[in-house]
Amino acid sequence: MGFLGKLKAGLEKTRKNFTEKIEQLVVGYATIDDEFLDDLEAVLLSADVGVHTTAKLMTDIKKGIKSKDINGPEDLKPFLQNKISEMLTEDSNEIKLAAAPPTVIVVVGVNGVGKTTTIGKLGQYYKEQGYKVILAAADTFRAAAIDQLEIWGTRTGSEIIKHKEGSDPAAVAFDAVQSARAKKADIVIIDTAGRLHTKSNLMEELKKIGRITSREIPDAPHETLLVLDATTGQNAINQAKLFGEAIPLTGIVLTKLDGTAKGGVVIAIKSELNVPVKWIGVGEGVGDLRPFVPQEFAEALFGDK
């Protein structure tokens, strides 16, 4: 099964909670009236599309009815597919690489979202593209995180830069960047602590990593990716808001899309935070994390099963 097939399979729960409910609405109503629109709004909210995004889509739908782009319930599904695809492609989802290596990628997120595993999968992806990768174990507050990253380093054939537990995370990032330059590595992926995102000291540490890397390499970090667990729905939005207030995020990695009926959170993230989803995970396998392609997502969500 190719990745699009896995994406379609992974979005099955969301499709049941979203697209199929829209289809049931279309069958149940002969015309679009206020009751139909109220039911549609409830479907959008139940799929974790979000209050802000739902309001925007409902406004677009009412405009579509006035302009005769929507003449009946049967026109609604293709209209929504186009609108959601447009929303997701408003800004670039392109993954940035440095003009001259190394590219520095900082990965942030709370504990439990699959952050360290995501870093391992990112490393594997870039290795498959022919890049030389260094992984930096800058989550120095959890010995398990360092050990876990070492396992991924061995699995992917990537060098690991680590210090002992409790060391200064920024010092690990500094050594990783220096090593990448000395060994002509292409990509440095930096793991970071994931303790409660409300703690200001954690956010200060993340800012310090940013300052250290930018001092050593112009424009670094080239990507600051926030890992979110799709199964948490709107809670993922709240996490993203808190991280975004502390550090500039360039993209979202959304994991566990295959385990949730809340896949609509992809749309909510883009609309409410204006931060593009750049990677999505639809399984446990090493190859189940891939760059996010909005058109593929809309096709998988609305297309034939």
Image (cartoon, grey):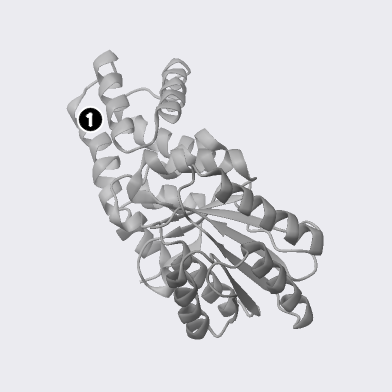
Extreme residue in the front direction:
166
Please, is residue 66 above or below residue 102 in the view?
Answer: above
Give the residue at x 47% y 84%: 155
Q: Is residue 140 visible?
A: yes
Q: In this orientation, which residue lies closer to the viewer: 27 or 213?
A: 213
Q: In which quarter of the image is the C terminus?
A: bottom left
**Residue 2 at x, y = what percent?**
40, 70
Q: Is residue 191 left or right of residue 2?
A: right
Q: In this view, does 183 lie to the left or right of 268?
A: right
Give the residue pinned by disc 1.
Answer: 25
Q: Is residue 199 left or right of residue 114?
A: right
Rendering quarter of residue 214: bottom right
Q: In this view, does 230 lie to the left or right of 192?
A: left
Q: In this orientation, which residue lies closer to the viewer: 102 or 165?
A: 165
Give the residue at x 74% y 54%: 211
Classed neighbour count for the residue bearing mark 1: other residues with Cα under 10 Å, few (<14), some (14–19), many (≥20): many
Rendering quarter of residue 129: bottom right
**Residue 48 at x, y = what percent?**
35, 37
Give the residue at x 66% y 50%: 207
